[in-house]
Image (tube, rainbow, N blue to C red):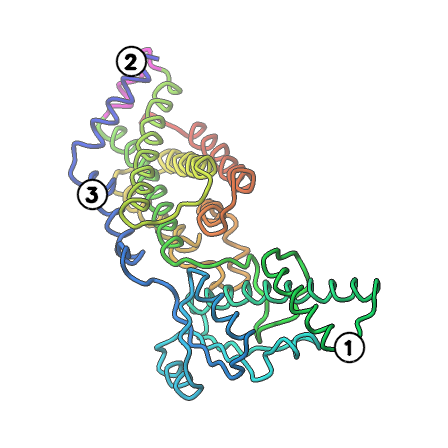
Amino acid sequence: MKKIIAIFQKETILRFTSPVEWLFFLILPLFFTFVLAGGTAGNMDTRTRLAVVDQANSPLSAQLIAGLEASGSIRPDVKALAEAEDEFSKRNVSAVLVIPPDFTLEKLREGAISLDLRQLPNNLNALAAYQTVQTILGRLSSSVEIAQQSVQAAEELRPFENDAERSAYFDAALDAAQTELAAAPQRVATAQASVEDPIEYDPRANSSAGQLITWVFIPLFGISVTFAYERATGTLRRLLTTPTRKATYLLGTLLAAVFWALVQMLLLVLFGIFGMKLNWGHSPAALAVILTASALAASAIGVAMGAFVKTEGQANGLSIMLGMVMALLGGCWYPLELFPAVVQQAVKVLPTRWAMQGMLDIVLRGEGLSAVLPEAAVLLGFAVVFYAIGIWRFRYE
């Protein structure tokens, strides 16, 4: 244990003696997180702007607009059709929602109503608008479904005397249903195919989570640089003359790397909370599990790389290049939904893809510990495989 602690201390001293290490450990991660996530945004309205053309001017359309306003992610901007189309053509807004004249409760009781949601292609704000509109429409649809079921149940007990009594009962049931929504078939649909995992998209949360994963993997790939440096300077060769076993050296080195990676992640999380007012989800345990599993997977790949590279320069170049490629294809910089389906399937071989999936489950979807255990298990599987390769191929010179 004393040898492991001594190696831990040695790696820590070496890590922070160079100003470049501080650059990668704290300065660059904070800078890119701040810039790419849109700054502090404390007093700024960061909601996605959605142009709304209300051709119905009905109580139901007013409820839809109010629901969008209350969503927290969409800022509805009611405009005339010509003005909304002009702004959309100039790309001043990423989406336009046209509410048709027949968007009324009376028409809704008769059947489904189609809304026109026009979106810019491959646009994150447009995706956010679509998902939020679908959520609000689902609530309205469920309310109507519950009210209709209440009317049918009441009519089976005692027929209504006239349509006015039926309508009044429906309105009362609808008011009650809107406070207690239940799952029901959706009766209102937008002119858009459904997407997987309907969530209220927060670009800041996605960007911050992506930067967090990026700056976990790239520095931990740098374990290969440590091995190459100590191999070139003869430090590893001198270990052969001491009672220090290979396992002791590797464990001390890995503990130092993973420990400081976790410290770095904690600082970035705290910066997101206090500096950017970012919500990192509702489960600190889930966040800790997915970040720890990510650190172990990244460090394992660093160990495996260190067993193959010959020089410090090779290790540096490979660490940065591989880290950036994995971050890009793993969804750290852009949502995977923007990539072709074949790419989305192919990148499942990358640990960054599973790390980002777990982070988005926590940050965007509000999932807890049980939901991220599959992603954590996959990351630990990566760790086991690459640790085994690295230890098997490890050499002193």
Q: Position of residue 114 (x, y in %)?
A: 61, 78
- Residue labelled with disc 1: 162
Residue 342 in the image: above or below residue 354:
below
Look at the numbered disc 3 and give the secondary structure of its residue.
helix
Residue 70 falls in image quadrant: bottom left
Q: Amino acid at mark 1?
A: Asn
Residue 28's place in the image compared with 194, above or below, is above
What residue lies at 49% left-to-right and 80% top-to-bottom?
Answer: 54
Q: Which amino acid type is marked by label 3?
A: Leu
Residue under numbered circle 3: 23
The answer to whether residue 180 is above or below residue 166 is above
**Residue 214 picture location, percent across and down:** 35, 47
- Locate residue 74 relative to residue 19 in the image: left or right: right
Mark 2: amino acid: Thr
Left or right of 277, for residue 202: right
Q: For the residue labelled by badge 1, is the local secondary structure a helix, a strand or a loop?
A: loop
Give the label on residue 241, or none: 2
From the viewer's perspective, is residue 294 above or below residue 140? above
Q: Nearer the viewer, mark 2 or mark 3?
A: 3
Q: Secondary structure at mark 2?
A: loop
